[in-house]
Structure formats: structure tokens, C-alpha cells
Amino acid sequence: MDQDIDRWFPYPEYRPHQREMLEAAAEIVRTGGHSVFMVDAPTGSGKTSILSALLAARNDQRIVVVLRTVSQVSIYLDEIKKIRQNTNKRPRVAYLVGKAKTCQLRDEMDSVYLGCDILKIMTRQLLESRMQEYMHLAGRSQDTVYDPSKDDSLLELIMDEREGERSCCPYYLRSKEAYFFDGEIKFRSSRKAQEVGRAIGDNIIYLDELDEHCGDMCPYEAMALSAEDADVVILNYNHVFDDTYRDVMYNWLGLEPEKTILLIDEAHNLGDTVRAVNSDVLPQFSVKKAIKEVESSRMKARKAGLNQSLAVAEQILPRIMKFMEKMNEKGTSSEEWFDPHMFADFVFGESLVREDERMVAELMNLGDVIARQKEKESESSEIHLQKVGDFLFMLNFAKSDEAYVPLKYTDKRQVGGNTYTSTTLEIRNLDPSLQIESVMGQHHATVMISGTFSPPEAYELYYFANNGRATIMTLPNQFPPENRLVLAASRATTQSSLRDDRDNVTEIQQHLEAFITGVAGNVVVYFTSYNLLNQYMDVCTMIANAAGKQIYLEPRDSKEVSSVLGRFFQAGLKSATKPGVLLAVAGGKMSEGIDYRGEALKGAMVVGLPLTAYTEIQKTVNEYYKGKYGKKQGMFIAYTLPAMNRALQALGRVHRAADEDGVLVLCDFRFSSKGGMGVREYLPEWMDRELKVCSGKESAQLITEWVKDYKHADVPLETKGFLNVETDNNEVQEPVLQTGKIKKTRLLNILGKIARSKERFYLGTINNQLKKEDRLDSMQLKEIFTDEDFSRLGLKACYVPSIGEVEVKRIRKNDK
């Protein structure tokens, strides 16, 4: 069976420990029985190739890759493409991402999901109307089919419809056809949509190619069709771990949990995602809209015989609104616990006979009537009364289960000269283990991979409520240790009792100066909070100015992140005169999910152990886990484990490839101490082994010596190639990396090597002769990438001579 892995593995050779990891993953699949495999493998371990082992070991099972972000989709498409190119296997892959990324009309809508719902209802109504006209002319029969893409008169009608005046979605319309069956008009995917969907599986289509591939078809419908016979389906966390989403999604895509293997990437994020899925939020505006829904549906409800449901809604909704208005008067912006029993008494208490669950059911029945009415009137399918009902249903959990905490908080916002106050109620889930076990207990097998599962046994306990549930494997760091310096403070700390201590502040300032001044190029300093960042911002600015560097601040508004990053990446170019110092927050917008490749980042420092603020709510979380696992383990899972992950994720931004170098600093003595308040025993083994403990003054010397004595470790370049490059007699051509059809995501790593090398590299079309005058080196690359792409790589621009298969070769002088 091991030979099966070799036949699916798309690379010339295995990295250290990679084959062992793949064999263990394959064994989990062969074992089945809802087994779980957790892999803690740092960047560079080749953990994405686990996909090839799952494909090799499966029988009739399908594989669902579960991702947190859309940006990860291309990584797995690349992996499937490599399997197809470098083996004789042809696995089919499909993916489903949100309509915000795929809807052809997304730029016309404030809310893509609501706008799409309305247009789909209108489109189906239009299809039904045209089908009736068609049957009137053609007659009724079981094989009557109406294809709108062949109805020239209809297409002419909708062709010139403008934004805000659409009678339907033209893309969804062409993706469907109406047919007559069993006395009813029904809908199904059109033949053209099925062809487009199959082609996505036949040819690997990346997200930025999807619009062009689908043409006048709906990309979302085409993606779903492509998944019906795909070997690998890529979904997001919510698709799989939200029971409502999963049931609908699996039914739509033809997936059966017992015949499905889960591959969960970035699995250190799974707990937070599942907790969010199992929580419920009720904003004040939803209650207001629910009241309006009831008022506008009063006559329909009475005709439907729902007088009791109507009476319940008219009693309960004003009571919830009154509760929220009282909270507005108090104006508490921080999260506060509220008593779920007292809230229920306030909302339901006026009834002569208390039947809370029955009253919630009456609300949901009325919500169903409103939903049908909205569909008939081509309105959004979002029903606010159902949101209220869902929240009241979750309230029952908060009354009896400590894993659910009721919270309230109030927001204030300025509009013009007026201040508006709004209260939000939330039932927050604290424990993801029940849901995670439930989902994984339904699937054939699950593989969870992360670069920061440290310590993995703690994550196992957090996710499954016991140890021994999963098979665990931890891989060493594959990158050369010579390419990094890892420091930890011996005295500095951000503990609240010492945060303003003069000697401690001086110690932190010395570490900041040593790091910002001593590390050439771009660096980032992560603080535990915005308050701490503000405390040291002036000091960092002064140090940066003295070192000839420019300060960049993490913005509060996420919309500004890409702009700040673009300028910061630009500052990292070798040609830049002023490198950057980015000040950010650990666990914030710039500490995870961003690829700081090449010269973009040469060092990262975490100032303090990034613990969550010790609020009353955090105390409740701590007490829950202490009660479940005991004081030590409970506090670690509730409070320390998330902080460790924030720190490790922040430091992980520096080394994204084997040939990159940089300095990592943990500026808090708790990272260098074991026992008591120390967390050193929970660091990855490689980090603990390489850690140099130092004072602020000593850190300056260590960084200076490392930069002075540093010799870049050789990193072998991979793979064979087919580009025939014309050379002079004293030149030798060497293959570097072979790629497929040129896409940004596939060229980034190659171009990063070009940018950092003093040698000359060339791009050209595979199997074609490339003349000397056509060679392109790193100084000639033009026109295909954005400025932001190049600021990350240290390149000026790129031009590719062909849109076909492209390969890179290195040309060097012949030493013989």
C-alpha cells in the first residue's frame, strides 16, 4: 500500500519526515471508524501533500478540504495540478466560496447575499411565467422543457436592464431550465450550466479565472455542479461545522458524511470558529425589523389561522425591545453577563401560564408564514422574526448549560450631529468539543493540520474533551536553523503589576532598540493590545527615526490594511531608502493569514504574552474550564493556549520559505521560564532548543553578532524542466522550477528566488527555443503584477512572453 503513496506523490523526493507523515495519514483513512489524525508541522514541512496520501488510501470515499480563508483555495488547486502534471493520476477537484467573491453582479449590491436571494426569487418567478406561456403554445407533456438561453425575445428584454432595475439575474436565468413533471413546473440546471460545471473539474479553474470560464452562467451554480462528481471538494469551516449549512450543502453536493474524509487546514483556528457557529447574536435592529414584519403580516397570519402566534409575537417583541432600551439608558459598552432566568421572566412573565418553549415555537411558525409571503413578493429571504426565535431557543441552553454564557453590550455611533445607541444580546458558546466530536463522529476519518498546534495534547483536550481521541504527530522545523536567531527576554514583562515599573519599561525599550536598530530591513513589533502599542509608540518612532526607518501602524479599520501593507512591503525593497517598522497587535489584522515573503520581513518581535483582557467574561470562561479539567489544565486551555497561538502565529510571519532569514524575539520573561507563570515548556521543541535568553542590553550584542557572522544556508532548488534556452559556450543552463499556466499564485515563490538572487534567471515557454535576446532577468520583469505583489518580492515588475506553459531556468557561467 505504501507504493500507492509514491504513485500519487507529485514531487521528485520527500522532505525529512514527510513520508512518515503521509503514511500515518493514509493509515488513518484505511482504519476509518471516525478516527482523527492531528499533525503539528511547521511551515516548510510539506503538509499540504497529505492530500496525495488521502487520495492514495481512499476507496470510494470523497475528500472535503476544510479551509478558513478563500486565499487558501489556490494552494490546494496547485497541489491537485501538480498531481495531474507529475503523476498519471487525474483527480477531479471542486470548490465553493461565498457569493461575495463569485456573484457576477456583486458590484451592484450593498449586500450580495440579500440581493442574490431577491434576484433568484424573481428569476424563478420569471421562469415559471415563461414556462406557462411556452406550454400554452407547445402543449403540456412530461418531456416539455423550457430553456431560457434559447428564448431570444426574453434575452433581448433583459439584455439592457441596468443596475437597480433588474427583473431577474441574467446569469442565474441561463443556468436553469424549467420542465413539467408530475403536474408541476420544476427547475433544474441547464445543459450549458452542466457543461460549464463539468469543465471546472476537468480543467483546474482558479477563482480569478472563474468569471471568464463561466461566461454568461452563474459561477456559484457552476461550482456546485462541478462538485457533484469531484474527488476533492474544498469548503469553508462554516459549511462543515454549522449543522444547518452542512446538511443543506452536503445534500446539494451529493456528499455522505460516512463516505467523506475531512482534511482541516489551519486547524488551530477550529475551536474559535465552532464556538462562533454555536453562538447566537441578536442586535436591536433585528428586533425592530421583526416588529415591522409582524405588523405587515397581520392579515396573512389571521387568514392562516395563526392568531395565537400573532398574539405571542405582539406580546414578546415589545418586551425584548423594552429590555434593550433600558440597556441603552445604562450605556455599557463593555460586555456584561445578564441573568437568562430574569430575562426570560421579563419577556415571557406576563403570561398566565408560562410555556416558554411553546411560545418560541409559535414565533417560528409565524416566521415561516412571513418567509413564504416575502418569497411571493420577491423580497429578501432574511426573516428577522426567525432570528428572534433562534435567539430565544438558544436562551434555553444558557439557563441550564454553563457552556453557554448570556452577554449584553451597547454600541454608540455618531451620524451627523446625533448619537445613536444600540444594544446587542448574545448567547456565547464557550466549549467547541461537543460540536467538533459530533461532526467528526459522522465522517469516515479526519486529518487536522496546523503549523502551530503547540502543544498538540492541549488542543486535543480542548477539541475532544479527552486525550487519546486522536493520533498525534509533531514534525521538527525543516528550515535551516542557521537562517534564524531566536531570542527571549530574561527580565522584561508586560504583566499588569510591572507594566509601568521604571526598570521594566527601560528593559522593554532596550529590547525594542536592539531589534529595530540591529535588524536590517523591514521588521514588525506585535504588542498585546492597542493600549500597550500606544504606550510604546513614541519610543518606537524615536528609535526608528534614529535608525533611518519609517513607522507603519496597524489600522483600526480593516479596509485600510491592504494599503498599509502595500506601503510597508514597498519599504522592504532592496532599492528602498527607508525600511519599515510595522507596529501591530498580536492576534490582530496583521498577525495571521498574511504572507510576508522575501524581503518583506526580516524580523518579528512579540512584546508581552498576548493574553486576553482579564474581564468578568474571561473569568467566567476560566472558571468553566477549571471546573471541567482542573485548575492547571483548565486555566491553560481557557487563558494561556490562545495567547501562545497568537505569539507563534505572529513570529511565523518571518520564515515562509527555506531560504529566508530573520530574527525572532519574545519580549517577556514568561516565554523563557518554565513552571509558575512560565510557558517555555509549551513552545515548539525547535524553538525551545534554539532560544537564547537575554537582557535588553545583551539582545543588542546578540543581534549585532548574528547579523555580522550570518552566512546564508544553502537551499537546493527543485525539479527538472524542459525549456530550451540558447546559451553561449561559456554558459550552463540549469532548470529551477517548472510551472503550469502562468498565474500569480504559482509564480510568487519562483519570483521570490529571482528577486533575492545575484544570479540571472530567465522565463520562457516550455519546449520552445528561447533566443538570447528574449531572455528576461529580474531587472527586466514588467507589466503583469501589481505594485503590491512586487513590493513583497523585491521585484520591479514582470513580463511573461507566453500565456502557455512557462518554466524558469538559471543561466550561469561554466566553471570548467
Image: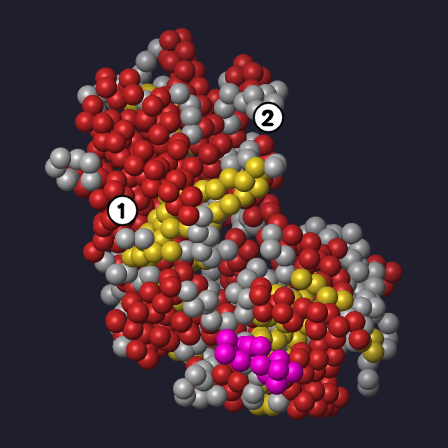
Mark 2–mark 1 distance (CA, rounded to whole Å): 45 Å
Number of other residues with Cα within 10 Å of mark 2, as a class: few under 14, some 14 to 19, many 20 or more: few
What residue appears at the point 31 percent right and 44 percent down from the top-left corner? 391
What residue appears at the point 62 percent right and 89 percent down from the top-left corner? 695
Q: Which residue is mark 1?
A: 343
Amino acid type, label 1: Phe
| Quarter location, residue 535 | bottom right
Q: Is residue 435 visible?
A: yes
Q: Which residue is mark 2?
A: 163
Amino acid type, label 2: Glu
Q: Nearer the viewer, residue 542 or 701?
A: 542
Q: Locate residue 315, reporting x and y percent.
A: 25, 31
Q: Locate residue 423, reporting x and y percent.
A: 42, 44
What residue appears at the point 20 percent right and 56 percent down from the top-left corner? 400
Q: What is the span of residues highlighted in magenta in the rendered image?
A: 494-506
Q: Nearer the viewer, residue 514 or 561?
A: 514
Q: Locate residue 55, reporting x and y percent.
A: 40, 62
Q: Residue furthest top?
A: 137
Instruction: Look at the image and say whether residue 420 sits in the magenta stretch.
Output: no
**What is the number of callouts on the image?**
2
Q: Nearer the viewer, residue 223 or 602?
A: 602
